[in-house]
Amino acid sequence: MIESDKIVLAELIALKAKGIVLSQKQEEEIAQLLEKYPVSKTLIEEILNNGTIETPFDIRKIKMEDELARFQASFPPQRLPWYRSKKVYLWTGTFVAASLLLVIGIKWTQTSGTADYIVKDDSYGQKNDVLAGNTFAKLAIEGQDTLFLSVDPEQQLQTDLSIANNFLIYKKTNPAASTRTKHSLIVPKRATYQVELSDGTKVWLKPDSRLDYDANFSAGERRVKLQGEAFFVIAKDLNRPFFVESNGMEVKALGTQFNIRSYGGANPLVQLTEGKIKVKGKGKDMTIDAGHQILLQAQGLAALPLPNPEEASSWKDGFFSFKNKDMRQIMDEISRWYGVQLQIDCILDDKQYEGGINKNASLAQICSTLKDLTGYNFKIDSNILIINKT
């Protein structure tokens, strides 16, 4: 962790732990730093949830002035000119900020700069292993603080929200009497999350995805915007069609189930497993029934058979599905779920593969399966996945 980032994170969390309401800009800065340095996320969540700082040592026996003087000495004066003039207490002037700064520094040092999801591999001959992602999301509410959502069943939310069975659930409301408040559910890499919207529609978001919507839909329609990938189970409502806008494409549904894959750099794809949908894109529209898919290409919409409907919903059911995907698609999906960088030292073929594995498997296990399936070689080096072919 860059030292200046460490200071800013410690300072903002100290203010939040004291119960001070932060500005939206400060909340966004915390979110960005936690996403940039996931090793600190668990510690920060403990502090914010419990109001305490838990450390592997007795902080009362540490001479804070000595430790922070040593920490301070590691900064070149020209990098942070305000630091020495403010002594060791930063902007807050509190022991909490100083303690938190020390804890984050020690915790990071103890892990040698390695994220806590990078572990030793004893089974597959890799340099190290990488654990699968988890359930986590950020909920940005218009005009309010950003909420950090995990699997904690004790997490307290506002009255119109609750969490049950790993779903964020919105209270059902009367559309005619409800105000519109913009919500954004943001799922980073190495995470997935599920939400039940105010109309009863369920959405499973994959890593590196975002869903924008009104907390309460209008009386005339239900409309959301998607970046990334998600599986939708649309609640039936004949009077209010459901629209999904995603990367130049609009999907209209009443009561259906479908998957949308719409990451930047790839052609958007809709896979329909139940019901009927109408898709618009490139100035054209097309209607398909279950068992079909629509691809948005440069020249327009293309309807194709859906060879394996289970592949569209496999993620929500707990599996990686490699069916009908080429190596580039498979590796991009692995990169998002395990949070690793790809180093591709060969030309990837466009062959489509068949297979699948539990998404909670470690990366080393995934690589072992993929080697048998594809013939490529995989090497894990910290958070870098190297792919080559002999």
Image: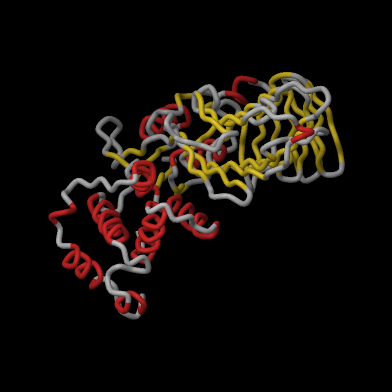
From the viewer's side, name the closer residue of 38 and 30: 30
Spot occupied by residue 184 in the image (x, y as percentages of width and height): 61, 44
Compared to residue 9, the image places residue 370 above or below, namely: above
Q: Residue 350 versus residue 282: which sits nearer the camera?
A: 282
Locate residue 97, reporting x and y percent. Answer: 32, 60
Q: Position of residue 227 (x, y in %)?
A: 64, 43
Could you tell me which residue is drawn at 17 percent across and 48 percent down? 57
Query: Taking 241 as reference, is 81 left or right?
Result: left
Can you say which quadrant of the picture contains the N terminus?
Answer: bottom left
The image's colouring method is secondary structure
> Is 328 positioned to the left or the right of 281 in the image?
left
Question: Relative to residue 254, is residue 192 depicted above or below?
Answer: below
Q: Which residue is more in the foreground, 283 or 141?
A: 141
Q: Does residue 74 appear left or right of residue 256 in this picture?
A: left
**Quarter that holds the C terminus:** top left
Residue 142 in view here: yes
Is residue 345 among what the camera can see? no
Image spot of residue 293 (x, y percent): 73, 28
At 27% across and 60% down in the image, what residue appears? 95
318 or 43, which is in the foreground? 43
Q: Height in image: 15 above or below 260?
A: below
Left or right: 146 with respect to 230? left
- Residue furthest to the right in view is 284
